[in-house]
C-alpha cells in the first residue's frame, strides 16, 4: 500500500513539474524537482528508480520541446543539460547508496545469524552492537548490553598488553579469554578482535567475534587426564605391558580365506605363517615391568622390535590358538607361552592380548604378560614333593604296620610264655595243681585269641575297613585289661587300683581297641615304676565324665615320670627311651583314640610319676 502511494505521489509530482515546466513561464531549473520523485520511489527498488529517472528525463525533454521548439536559446539549452545531468547523477548516487545499503543489511543479517558472538565496541570499550549469539551466550538482551562498558559487564580476563601489541603489529588479535555470563558461570572463549579505524587511521573501537570453547576445553582436559591416568597405570603396572602395532600381523592372517574353524590347524600346519604373524607384531612402547621381564635394560631396546625368535618352539600351538581366537573376531585372547629374555633366560608367561576398541585394523594392540615362571616352578616342586611324600607315607605306613603288629602281638606272646611256664611249674610240682594248670591254659587261650584279634584289627586298619562302633562299659574293659596284666604287676609288686567318679554312661566305639590302649598304658606305667624303690608302687585307673559327651580315663603311676625334653615327642613313632622299646605304643594309642573321636595327653604328676589321660565318646542318650 505504502509503495503504491509512493508511485502515485511520484507520478503526480512528476506531472505537476511537467505541467509547470511545459506550460508556464517559470524560468529556472524546475525540472530538478524530478529528483524528489526519484527519491520518493527509491525504496521501491532498482526498477522503480530507473523508471522514475527515465520518466523525469523524458518529461524534461518533452517540456523543453514544447517550450522552446521554435526558438532555441542557449541559456535554456544549458538549463536542460544541467537538469538532465543532475537527474542522471542523482539516479546514479541513489543506486550506489542502495547497493551499499543492501550489502550493509546483508552483513548485518550475517552477523545476526552467526552462532558466534559478535560485539562491536567503541574506543571507550562501550558496546555499540550485540548480536543474537551474544544474547544467547552471555544472557543479556541487546537493549541491556548496548551502551554498557564491555569489560565490566563481562568481567573479562585477558592480557591487554598482548592485545595492544597484536593491534599495533597487525591490526587484529586472536586468542583465548575468560568472561563471566549473566548467571555467574565462567566461560572460556576463542576470540578474534579487529581494530576499527577511522579514515585518518585513528582507532575508533573493536569488532570482535568469539566462540565458546569451555566445553571443548573441559573435554580436552578430561581426555588429557584420562590419558595421563592410562599412562600412569601403564608405567606403574606390576606386570609387563606393551603397546604394539599388529597391522602386518593382521595382513598375514587375512591371507587365509578358508573355513575359519580350520584356521588354527592351518596355522599349526604352516609354522612359517605363524612366524610371519609374530614378526608383524611390532612393539611400540613397553612399560618398565616389560623391560625387566625381557631383561632389556631400556624401553628403546624393545621399541620397534618384534618377539620373533623369543618364543620357544613349544609355544607355537599356544600362539596359534591365540591368533585363531583373534582372527575369529574376538577382541581379546590369552594363553600361556614360554619365551626367552634378551639375556637368554627362559620365562613362562600368560599372554593377554587386547585389540583396542578403536583399532579394528589391529594398529593398536595392548599385550600384557604375567610372569608365571615362579608359579610353574613351585607347582613342579609341589608335584615332586607330593610324589615323594606319597612314597614316604607308603613306606612309613608299612613300617608302622609291621611295628604295630610286632608290638601288639608281643604282649600276648609274652603272657602266653609266662602262663605256659607257670602251668609247667604247677604240673611239675610234687603234687601237680591241675586247677592252676587249667587256669594257666585258659589264660594261654585268652592271650592267643587276643593276639589273633590284634592281627585281625591291624589287617582291618591296613584295609581301611571300619569296625562297627558299639556301646561298652568302661569299668568292664578296665577290669579285663587289669586281668591281663595282673600277673606281671604282682611280679613287680605293683598295686593296681581303679575308681570311678559316680555312675558312668556307656562308652561308644571299638571296645577291643580301647582295651588295647589301656593295656598299653598300664604296661608303660609298670615299666616306669621298675626302678622305684623308695615308695609304694601303685598304678591307679580313674574313670570320669569329660565335657562334650565324652568319658575320661586316667592311668596314673608313681614312676620316674616323663623326661622334660621327651614330653613333646612321646607320641612320635619310634620314640623310645628304653633299650628294648620300639617307641610305637603311644603312637598307636593316639591314632586309635583319635580314630574313635577322642584325645590323649600325657603329663607328669604334682608328686612322683606320670598320668596319661584319654577320652572316648559316651553313648548318646537317645540311642
Ligand atoms: P616304648 O614301647 O618303646 O616304651 P612308647 O610309645 O610306649 O614306647 O613310649 C615312648 C616313651 O615314652 C617311652 O620310651 C618312655 O620314655 C615314655 N613313657 C611312656 N609311658 C611312660 C610313663 N608312664 N612314665 C614315664 N615315661 C613314659
Image (cartoon, helix red, strand yellow):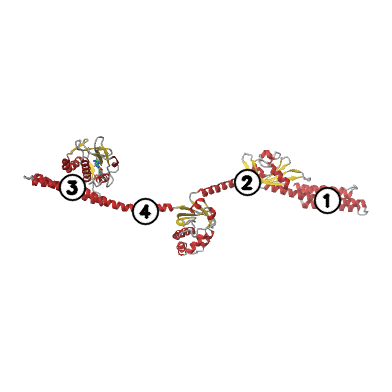
Q: Is residue 134 visible?
A: yes
Classify 10 Å Cα crowding around label 4: few (below 14), some (14-19), many (20 and above).
few
N-terminal of the pair, mark 4 or mark 1, is 1
Q: Position of residue 486 (x, y in %)?
A: 16, 41
Q: Nearer the viewer, residue 23 or 505?
A: 505
Q: Nearer the viewer, residue 235 or 426?
A: 426
Q: Position of residue 533 (x, y in %)?
A: 19, 37
Q: Position of residue 328 (x, y in %)?
A: 48, 59
- Asked if the residue under mark 4 is in contact with the one under mark 3, i.e. CB atoms within 8 Å, the reply is no
Is 344 drawn above or below residue 154 in the view shown?
below
Per the image, label 4 sits on a secondary structure element best described as helix
Write down the residue under mark 3: 412
Depth check, mark 4 against mark 1: the one in front is 4
Q: Position of residue 386 (x, y in %)?
A: 35, 52
Depth check, mark 1 against mark 3: the one in front is 3
Q: Nearer the viewer, residue 78 or 351?
A: 351
Left or right of 253, for residue 35: right
Q: Which mark is residue 314?
A: none
How far is disc 2 from disc 4 in space, using C-alphas? Answer: 65 Å
Distance from mark 3 CB to nearest ligand 1 atom below 8 Å: no
Depth check, mark 2 against mark 4: the one in front is 4
Write down the residue under mark 4: 383
How far is disc 3 from disc 2 in space, using C-alphas? Answer: 103 Å
Indicate the quadrant of ligand 1 in the picture.
top left
Write down the residue under mark 2: 213
Per the image, label 2 sits on a secondary structure element best described as loop
Amino acid at each position: 500500500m505504502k509503495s503504491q502511494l509512493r508511485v502515485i505521489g511520484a507520478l503526480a509530482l512528476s506531472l505537476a513539474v511537467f505541467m509547470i515546466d511545459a506550460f508556464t513561464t517559470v524560468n529556472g531549473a524546475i525540472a530538478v524537482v524530478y529528483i524528489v520523485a526519484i527519491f520518493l520511489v527509491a525504496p521501491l527498488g532498482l526498477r522503480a528508480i530507473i523508471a522514475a529517472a527515465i520518466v523525469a528525463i523524458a518529461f524534461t525533454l518533452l517540456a523543453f520541446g514544447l517550450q522552446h521548439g521554435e526558438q532555441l536559446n542557449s541559456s535554456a539549452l544549458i538549463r536542460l543539460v544541467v537538469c538532465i545531468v543532475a537527474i542522471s547523477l542523482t539516479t546514479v548516487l541513489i543506486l550506489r547508496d542502495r547497493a551499499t545499503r543492501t550489502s550493509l543489511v546483508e552483513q548485518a543479517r550475517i552477523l545476526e545469524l552467526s552462532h558466534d558472538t559478535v560485539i562491536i565496541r567503541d574506543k571507550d570499550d562501550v558496546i555499540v552492537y550485540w548480536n543474537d549469539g551474544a544474547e544467547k551466550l552471555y544472557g543479556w538482551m541487546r537493549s541491556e548490553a548496548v551502551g554498557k562498558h564491555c569489560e565490566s559487564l563481562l568481567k573479562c580476563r585477558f592480557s591487554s598488553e598482548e592485545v595492544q601489541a597484536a593491534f599495533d603489529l597487525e591490526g587484529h588479535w586472536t586468542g583465548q579469554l575468560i568472561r563471566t555470563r549473566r548467571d555467574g558461570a565462567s566461560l572460556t572463549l576463542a576470540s578474534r578482535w579487529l581494530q576499527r579505524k577511522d579514515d585518518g587511521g585513528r582507532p575508533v573501537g573493536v569488532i570482535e567475534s568469539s566462540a565458546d570453547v569451555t566445553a571443548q576445553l573441559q573435554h580436552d582436559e578430561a581426555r588429557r587426564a584420562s590419558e595421563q591416568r592410562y599412562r600412569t597405570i601403564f608405567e606403574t603396572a606390576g606386570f609387563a605391558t606393551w603397546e604394539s602395532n599388529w597391522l602386518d600381523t593382521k595382513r598375514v592372517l587375512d591371507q587365509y580365506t578358508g573355513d575359519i574353524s580350520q584356521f588354527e590347524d592351518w596355522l599349526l600346519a604352516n609354522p612359517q605363517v605363524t612366524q610371519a604373524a609374530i614378526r608383524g607384531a611390532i612393539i611400540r612402547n613397553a612399560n618398565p615391568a616389560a623391560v625387566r621381564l625381557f631383561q632389556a635394560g631400556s624401553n628403546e631396546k624393545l621399541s620397534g622390535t618384534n618377539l620373533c625368535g623369543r618364543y620357544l618352539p613349544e609355544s607355537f600351538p599356544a600362539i596359534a590358538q591365540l591368533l585363531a581366537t583373534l582372527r575369529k573376531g574376538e577382541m581379546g585372547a590369552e594363553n600361556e607361552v614360554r619365551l626367552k629374555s634378551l639375556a637368554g633366560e627362559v620365562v613362562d608367561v600368560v599372554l593377554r592380548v587386547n585389540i583396542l576398541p578403536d583399532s579394528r585394523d589391529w594398529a593398536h594392540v595392548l599385550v600384557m604378560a604375567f610372569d608365571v615362571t615362579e608359579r610353574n616352578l613351585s607347582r613342579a616342586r609341589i608335584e615332586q614333593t607330593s610324589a615323594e611324600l606319597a612314597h614316604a607315607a607308603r613306606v612309613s605306613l608299612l613300617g608302622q604296620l609291621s611295628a604295630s603288629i610286632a608290638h601288639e602281638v608281643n604282649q600276648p606272646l609274652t603272657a602266653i610264655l609266662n602262663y605256659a611256664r607257670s602251668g609247667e611249674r604247677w604240673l611239675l610240682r610234687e603234687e601237680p595243681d591241675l586247677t592252676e594248670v587249667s587256669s594257666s591254659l585258659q589264660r594261654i587261650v585268652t592271650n592267643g585269641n587276643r593276639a589273633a584279634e590284634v592281627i585281625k584289627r591291624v589287617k582291618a586298619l591296613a584295609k581301611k575297613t571300619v569296625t562297627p562302633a558299639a556301646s561298652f562299659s568302661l569299668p568292664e574293659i578296665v577290669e579285663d585289661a587289669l586281668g591281663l596284666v595282673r600277673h606281671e604287676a604282682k611280679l613287680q609288686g605293683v598295686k593296681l587300683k581303679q575308681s570311678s567318679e559316680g555312675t558312668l554312661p556307656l562308652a561308644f566305639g571299638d571296645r577291643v581297641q580301647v582295651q588295647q590302649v589301656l593295656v598299653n598304658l598300664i604296661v608303660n606305667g609298670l615299666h616306669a615304676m621298675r626302678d622305684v624303690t623308695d615308695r609304694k608302687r601303685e598304678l591307679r585307673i580313674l574313670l570320669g565324665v569329660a565335657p562334650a559327651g565324652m568319658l575320661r580315663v586316667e592311668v596314673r603311676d608313681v614312676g620316674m615320670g616323663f623326661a622334660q625334653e621327651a614330653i613333646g615327642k612321646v607320641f612320635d613313632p619310634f620314640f623310645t627311651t628304653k633299650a628294648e622299646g620300639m617307641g610305637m605304643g603311644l603312637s598307636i594309642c593316639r591314632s586309635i583314640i583319635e580314630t574313635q573321636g577322642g584325645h590323649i595327653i600325657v603329663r607328669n604328676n604334682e608328686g612322683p610319676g606320670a598320668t596319661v589321660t584319654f577320652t572316648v565318646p559316651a553313648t548318646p542318650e537317645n540311642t
